[in-house]
């Protein structure tokens, strides 16, 4: 990713969701990734799920070939995914929990309970030169465990904050925002690079982008949804502008 103070990673999974609804090649996530690059995305994020419900293996091959910005490859901690990551050696690998029946990545990874297993899992990825990020809830136990296993980055799950905000439960959403703020500062104090992602919209981006310790936001569903109404490039440009306003 570039050395901009706060980077924007655009997640293109749901372009593939729309494509797969008809089983053909259209719309192409690679074309969306190229447009996102042109619109100023600092990186592209894609989640190769075990069930391949959106992004496919061929999409990852194509992204690795064509991207000029870094790929943040999201994956579950499985042997199959580790082998794919080691073959491609993307710029970053973000380890996420995955349940087949979930609609999206509902929670953060339980690092604290699986410390040994995860430490062994990420070691070869780090040796291969990938930056390893762990997707966790804004919880001190998980931040500390991610640090202990040798991850370089934590991505804090913003879903609770964003969902409560969308439901109009403002006091509760403010409490979640405060947890994100505290854990961003805490993770940074441990030497971790802090990213935030999941559920972020035009309405929720600024308070998160204002945290000075946060280095990257990964945003997908809302940007792709908004692209239906205003186009992909304007949706990315508007998100970028809100991020910049928050940092100004
Ligand atoms: N970051 C991580 C680790 C994710 O799993 C996801 C969802 O796939 C996102 C960011 C993007 O979330 P959204 O699509 O809700 O913006």
Image (cartoon, rainbow, N blue to C red):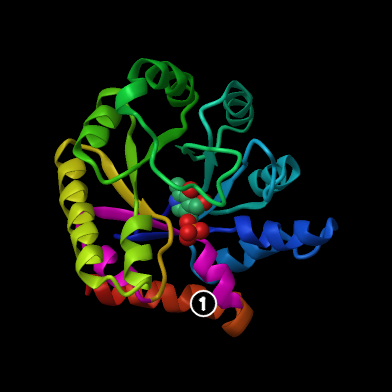
The percent coordinates of residue 214 (x first, y second) are: 26, 54
Instruction: Tell me where the magenta segment starts and ends, as one range.
Output: 203-227
Residue extending farthest bottom: 230
Where 155 falls versus 130 (above or below)?
A: below
Quarter where residue 75 is shown: top right
Residue found at x 44% / y 24%: 122
Q: How many marks?
A: 1
The percent coordinates of residue 149 (x first, y second) are: 31, 23
Query: Which quarter of the image is occupied by the C terminus?
Result: bottom left
Q: Is residue 67 left or right of residue 26?
A: left
Residue that carries the numbered disc 1 in the rendered image: 235
Find out whether residue 220 is within the magenta segment.
yes
Q: Element type at marker 1?
A: helix
Find out whether residue 244 is within the magenta segment.
no
Residue 210 is at least partly visible in this image: no
Q: In this view, does 244 lie to the left or right of 220?
A: left
The percent coordinates of residue 194 (x first, y second) are: 29, 47
Residue found at x 58% / y 49%: 46
Where 127 falls versus 93 (above or below)?
A: above
Q: For the residue carrying disc 1, how many other residues have a C-alpha within 10 Å: few (<14), some (14-19), or many (20+)? A: many
Nearest the viewer among 54 and 218 is 54
Where 240 falls versus 107 (above or below)?
A: below
Residue found at x 36% / y 71%: 167
Nearest the viewer among 111 and 81 is 111
Residue 122 is at least partly visible in this image: yes
Residue extending farthest right: 24
The percent coordinates of residue 222 (x first, y second) are: 50, 69
Q: Is residue 90 left or right of residue 192?
A: right
């Amino acid at each position: 990713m570039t050395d901009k103070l706060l980077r924007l990673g655009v997640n293109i999974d749901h372009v593939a969701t729309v494509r797969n609804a008809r089983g053909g090649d259209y719309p192409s996530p690679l074309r969306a990734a190229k447009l996102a690059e042109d619109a100023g995305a600092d990186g592209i994020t894609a989640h190769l799920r075990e069930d391949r419900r959106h992004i496919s293996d061929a999409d990852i091959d194509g992204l690795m070939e064509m991207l000029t910005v870094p790929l943040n490859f999201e994956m579950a901690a499985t042997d199959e995914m580790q082998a794919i990551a080691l073959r491609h050696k993307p710029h970053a690998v973000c380890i996420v929990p995955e349940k087949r029946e979930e609609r999206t990545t509902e929670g953060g990874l339980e690092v604290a309970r699986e410390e040994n297993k995860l430490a062994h899992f990420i070691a070869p990825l780090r040796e291969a030169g990938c930056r390893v990020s762990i997707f966790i809830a804004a919880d001190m136990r998980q931040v500390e465990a991610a640090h202990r296993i040798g991850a370089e980055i934590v991505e804090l799950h913003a879903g609770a904050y964003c969902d409560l905000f969308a439901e109009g439960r403002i006091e509760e959403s403010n409490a979640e925002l405060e947890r994100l703020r505290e854990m961003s500062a805490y993770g940074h104090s441990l030497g971790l690079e802090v990213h935030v992602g999941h559920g972020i919209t035009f309405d929720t981006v600024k308070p998160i982008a204002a945290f000075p310790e946060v280095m990257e936001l990964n945003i997908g569903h809302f940007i792709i949804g908004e692209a239906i109404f205003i186009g992909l490039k304007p949706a990315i440009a508007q998100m970028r502008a809100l991020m910049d306003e928050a940092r100004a």
